[in-house]
Image: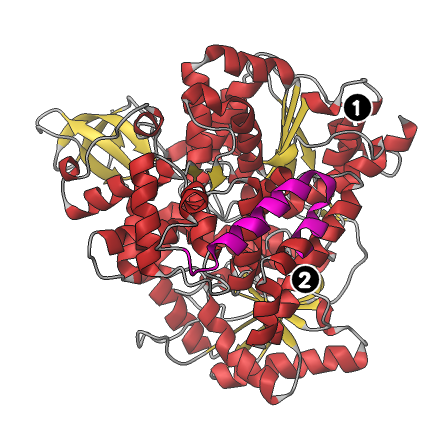
Amino acid sequence: MEELLDGLNPSQQEAVVSTEGYVRVIAGAGSGKTRALTHRYAFIVNELGIDPANILSVTFTNKAAHEMRRRVKKLIGGEQDTGFITTYHGFCVRVLREDIHRLFYPKNFVILDVEDQKILLREIFEDMGLKLNDKTFKRILDKIGILKGNTHYVQQMILRGQMPSVEESGDLDSQIIQQYLKKQKRVYGLDFDDLLNFVFTLFEQNKEVLEKWQDRLFYIQVDEFQDSSLKQFELVKMLAEKQGNLFVVGDPDQTIYEWRGADPKYMVDFENYFTDAQTIFLKENYRSTPEILSLGNALIRNNYFRVDKDMLPVNPSGVKVVHYHGKDEIQEAKWIVSRIKQLVEKKRANLSEIAILYRANYLSRFVEQELIAENIEYTIFGGFKFFDRLEIKDALAHLRMIAFQDDLSFSRIINVPKRQIGKKRMSFLREKAEEEGRSLYETLKKYADHDRLRRTGAQSFIDAIEYLKEIRSRRKVSELLQEAMQVTGYEAYRREDGDQERLDNMTELLHSIVQYEQTLGEDIDLDEYLQMVSLYTDNDRADQIDSIKLMTIHTAKGLEYPYVFVIGMSESVLPNVRAIRQRKERGLEEERRLAYVAVTRAEQELYLTESEGFQNGGQKKYPSRFIFEVEDRFYDRIGELDESLIEEAKEYIRASHRLEKEPSGDFFEKGTRVKHPVFGEGSIQEVDEKKNNYLVFFDRLKAPRPISRNFKKLEKL
């Protein structure tokens, strides 16, 4: 036990040994939360004697889960199965692979990513004679997302027999969506929303399945809990109900995904959901200098909806934070690049230790131009994702054909390289498959000698896939991929194509599989690898080149760099004007958390930069309110910022959005009787914190009215 607790501070030690009941750990930026989580996991295994198969450890990205598994294996020994260190989606796949047959769905269902969804939509648009249009695609995918906000549609997909006809569905969009669900069912494909929804439906309709998983999972721990959505919260709450052991770690001050469904209230109000919950604070910051931390603390203190804490520095004092104000974007870019050159020359900092962060991708352009002019290497993170590249999708589709022979993978690679199976022959195959209730691959095997297919490469494709299926159990995934690329002719086709970057990417994919096999120290089977990679949504592969990293603040979450530049810190950019318009005070608070995340990425030096001029819409640029919210003593200012511009900026901020904060005691609760100067007396029906208003039913009106919580003339009776 001493070994596990050695090197941990008292709060981390408390977190490690708090194994029973409901525990919330508020872990600020750079406070060593991953260390606490992995050591707690090892404590449960090594000191309590619990099998890893009885511990669920959920985190938000595959990269984080992979890293946690690697660290845990070092602590508990490599031979134990740590498969339940996973993401929410990864866990749902585990449940469904085991129990989805109870919903009359096959266990070898295919996981669909956005690209797969688009393939299905393209087919539908062609079938219905509609024009292909990316905007329409986005609108339909958004509508499908809304439909899948609840679980009602799952019943349609699991009913045996015919689904409701497309014609009965209503307007054109509804018909397309109905057709999409039918095609999804036909290929037995589940997208990311389906994974959670199918698990909820499975648990609701089969209580014994829920009980089986509750009995299996004695300990549940969740990382980055502040990013949980309602569904994710409900899932862990349901799973923990029987054993009563739920351990959550996170920082409400770093919730930056509310627009995607994350809600910090489950973290902030944890003790309301679980009345006997214990709270532990990890306040020591091992990442940043006191100067950077002081500025971060001062900034985030302006938020109302949070758990109050100040991060305490462990590192020695460093240099002051710098705020640079330029006369225009070009001057701002030139100053940033000259400061980078100084850092590299004087301090001998590597380029890879420097990050440039921004609120939106378009802001990188003016800095990129200057970096190019000065011949400085840089890499953009979060650009075109590695696993979305054409050749990578093709390579993985070959592996999926070996595992599942699914229609999507078949459609993707049957004619790559060319096998004379174009649109007309594919239509023939689709018709036959539909008539006979077979997959496209089974149909191809049956009709390979048919007149329509005789003079094509159908038989050689079948021979290659059958050979790969036969050797599958005797090969590692990496070896199987190499053979697949050779026997199907795909690698030769890419070599003839002559695109070196595509070949490099395929080599990188193979390298990543070999690395995965080595670091886990265990044989992973093909299904497990495909499950892992299809849930891989990050652009977080290690970058070997010594280059400056450019990325959005959202992409930077979870990363850290010795030198950080947060650029384009203008009002209406950070905070983003649309976020405030749409979500009022809650939008502003999330933008402030975003700025806090940016600030706390820095270890040694932090630079906040902005400039004068005009934004895209012709609006005059002012420094961000987040710079004014922090007292001048927290940073050194470089560049001339006129007092008149400061006053003008503050006036603009005051006029466009309310800045003042109401103390929490001034807010009324649901059910309170109130008096309005015009509407008279009434009762508060709802309190909407996101929109920052009350829904009040006034006695003499027929319907309730939304009244701002900042409205001073609403009095309590």
2 vs 1, front mark: 2
The residue positioned 66% from the left and 79% from the top of the image is 377
Which residue reaches farthest right?
Answer: 2
Instruction: From the image, tell me which residue sits under label 1.
Output: 45
Dot 1: element: helix
State whether the magenta stretch is mostly helix, strand or loop.
helix
Question: Residue 575 placed where, x, y %?
Answer: 43, 59
User: Residue 486 or 265: which is nearer the viewer?
Assistant: 486
Q: Is residue 48 above or below residue 651?
A: above
Q: CA distance from mark 2 to mark 1?
A: 35 Å
Instruction: From the image, tell me which residue sits under label 2.
Output: 508
Please give the count of numbered marks on the rendered protein.
2
* Category of crowding for the residue at label 1, using alpha-carbon neighbours closer than 10 angstroms: few (below 14), some (14–19), many (at least 20): some
User: Residue 237 or 487: which is nearer the viewer?
Assistant: 487
Q: Are marks 2 and 1 in contact (CB under 8 Å)?
A: no
Magenta stretch in the rendered image: 454-482
In screen coordinates, is 38 left or right of 464? Answer: right
Q: Quadrant of residue 223?
A: top right
